Image: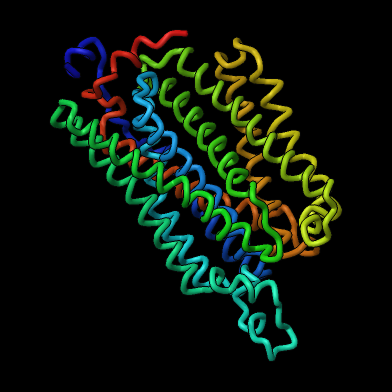
Amino acid sequence: MGEHSIQHTEIKTYSVTKNNKLLAFILMGIGLASIAYGFATDGLREWANLLLGNFYLMAIALGSLFFLAIQYVSEVGWTVQLKRIMLANSMYLIPATLFMIIIFIFGHHDLYHWTHHDLIDKTSPHYDKIIDGKSSFLNVPFFIIRLVLYAVIWAGAAILLRREAIKEDMNGGNTHYFKSFKISAIFLVLFAVSSSTSAWDIIMSLDPHWFSTLFGWYVFSGTFVSALTVITLITIYLKKAGYLPNVNASHLHDLGKFMFAFSIFWTYLWFSQFMLYWYANIPEEVTYFIDRVNNYRILFWLSPIINFVIPFLVLMTRESKRYNSLIIISSIFMLFGHWLDLYLMIMPGTVGHEHSHLGIPEFGTLAFFVGLFLYVMFTSLSKAPIIPKNHPMLQESFHHHI
């Protein structure tokens, strides 16, 4: 069935060009030099930059895996031609989760205030009752165990789904599709828990006195929007390069709708979290936002403008979602905006406003992880045909029109 469905379509395997590799290696080289410079000038700031850069790209990979799993479980057909892009992005979870464990093991004393033992020692003058009360959850051994579990769940699901996709190409039939369905269903259940707990662990615990019941959803929304944006940009790139001849304006229109919808969802959560805490004005809760509003005023108010106002105005009409140039412009703003959003989550609780800057260490460290992401993604794309030729819903994707 699969071969007959695509008899008029040439199935290509992506060929990693010299320019692809060169770009990835240049970015990683710049990043390594920046990381060395960062540690030489301000070690604490560089640990925070490593956490920021790795979490940002890891979140994009995780959001791509989540979107892929949703396609399987909901039995969606229009995205079939895009599934290899989602798979390629998700393979970055393998190095990203490893980096996250390494960053915590070697940088936790600088990044995470609660790891200082004297805070839970009742005989110490630095004893902190609130942190001591959370010590059964916030302690180094249990934290590392949770990071390892996240790595196993996320990277494991990506590897299993890729394995079934390759077997589906070789063997045909529906067996591997239904196995992917089951893997995706199990992953989504685990993701529902791990996406929130990982946000609490990795990001929210940087400010251990503060918590938000919306935080897991808030981080997820930014994660998913960023992933959708990257999927869309790669789709446009591969379409222009001739690898996705049957991807049409309707596919891009639907991706644009997702970007538009979840940018509004992110804004709803951003406003809900900020407004409720600010209005209640409870000292131990509102301090988190007072720090950001007073000491990061321009960046704090710039974040909703970039992440909501620009995509809302650019992607609101039907026609705008069908023009590559408008989608690309909106995507660039959104990717920077959600990196900035993460910057505002991480920097105040680690380096503080006196040492927070947007400079060479921040953008250079980000360049390293972007380069590594591109290398892993392009390499993964080159290992299998771009179009899953034996997928049972391939024809639906070919004839998707709205």
User: For residue 178, which quarter of the picture?
Assistant: top left
Q: Residue at x 62, y 33 (%)?
A: 332
Q: Residue at x 74, y 37 (%)?
A: 304
Question: How many numbered tags mark residues here?
Answer: 0
Work out which quarter of the rendered image holds the N terminus and state it.
top left
Q: Residue at x 51, y 37 (%)?
A: 227
Q: Residue 113, how many percent across, how many down?
A: 65, 72
Q: Nearer the viewer, residue 10 or 184?
A: 184
Q: Is residue 216 left or right of residue 16?
A: right
User: For residue 34, which quarter of the picture?
Assistant: bottom right
Q: Residue 116, how many percent across, how many down?
A: 62, 79
Q: Is residue 30 visible in the rendered structure shown here?
A: no
Q: Is residue 330 left or right of residue 183?
A: right
Please determine whether, in this image, residue 227 is positioned above or below residue 350. above
Q: Is residue 182 visible in the rendered structure shown here?
A: yes
Please determine whether, in this image, residue 176 is positioned above or below residue 374. above
User: For residue 241, which quarter of the picture?
Assistant: top left
Q: Residue at x 71, y 54 (%)?
A: 359
Q: Residue 122, how many percent across, how many down?
A: 67, 87
Q: Nearer the viewer, residue 73 or 14?
A: 73
